[in-house]
Amino acid sequence: MTDGVGVWLYAVTVDGGAAEELGHVTGVAGEAVRVVIANGLAAVVGTVPLEVFGKEPLRRNLEDLTWLEATARAHDTVVSAVARRGPAVPLRLATVYLDDDRVLGLLDERRTDFRSALELVTDRTEWGVKAYGDRDALTAAVADAKATSSDIGAGTAYLLRRKAQLSAQETVERDAATRADEIHAHLVRHAAGGRRQAATDPALSGRRDWMVLNGTYLVDDERADEFVSTVRELGKEYPGIRLELTGPWPPYSFAGVEREPI
């Protein structure tokens, strides 16, 4: 690269004409994306100005949520375009190298990892499932389950229900966590892989809902309809828990094999 510019990495895929197919796609700096090829791998990259995307400017810019959102969208547009054309290993946002030689070094050094990751994600896509708890509804559901009984009088039933409500109020956090564990375990059985992520930062999502599960799942494309149906059925089985399905996405959560940028 010439002085003042660097190389932004989007994804690694198999070598096979990606440059021509992605000719219409532009990246985070409005640049035309291109490929750097080595060892049968193709890194999809863009040339970006270091005055904006260098280490220190980038650190400042990433604190600007408006800039971050726009840049993340542009990055994902390229990654998604690559993933639509075949298996792709997405690189994390803001992976910038100084020149193509360093990108070639990455492809050479991590070729085994990249090939393994590409094999893992072939014909598979990432889906997200978030679970949100409603404290009042969850407390009522747990209380109903604890108080349900037959062969008792109305007065006893009332006392049992009242006791169950008080108990459920005290254990609502634990009850929500238990349900989240069960939902995640069930979804993992219908996926090639599953991970629990940290709850989304409300400052980034703009939402204040009580998130009890933030899961990502790598699903065989041929089983995608089955996975979607499973999420819908689980949403009906857990009163007080609302499930939100997103996707399909490139496999960001399952193919991170890059080293620190230089």
Image: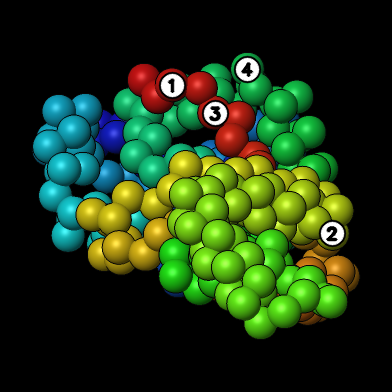
Q: Quadrant of residue 203?
A: bottom left
Distance from disc 3 to disc 2, alpha carbons, whole Å, reads 28 Å
Q: Which residue is mark 4?
A: 109
Mark 3: amino acid: Glu
Secondary structure beneath disc 4?
A: helix
Where residue 212 sits in the image (x, y, percent)? Answer: 51, 54
Which quadrant, please, contains the C terminus?
Answer: top left
Mark 2 or 1: the one toward you: 2
Secondary structure beneath disc 1?
A: loop
Against 217, is 103 above or below? Answer: above
Left or right, 215 with respect to 66, comes to right
Q: Quadrant of residue 242?
A: bottom right
Tell me if I can see residue 123 in this picture.
Answer: no
Mark 3 or 2: the one toward you: 2
Mark 2: amino acid: His
Q: Quadrant of residue 143?
A: bottom right
Of the numbered discs 4 and 1, the one sitting upstream in the chain is 4
| Relative depth, front residue between 149 and 42 | 149
Q: Which residue is mark 3?
A: 258
> Residue at (82%, 43%) from the top-left corner?
119
> Residue at (47%, 49%) from the top-left corner?
170
Distance from disc 3 to disc 4, alpha carbons, whole Å, reads 10 Å
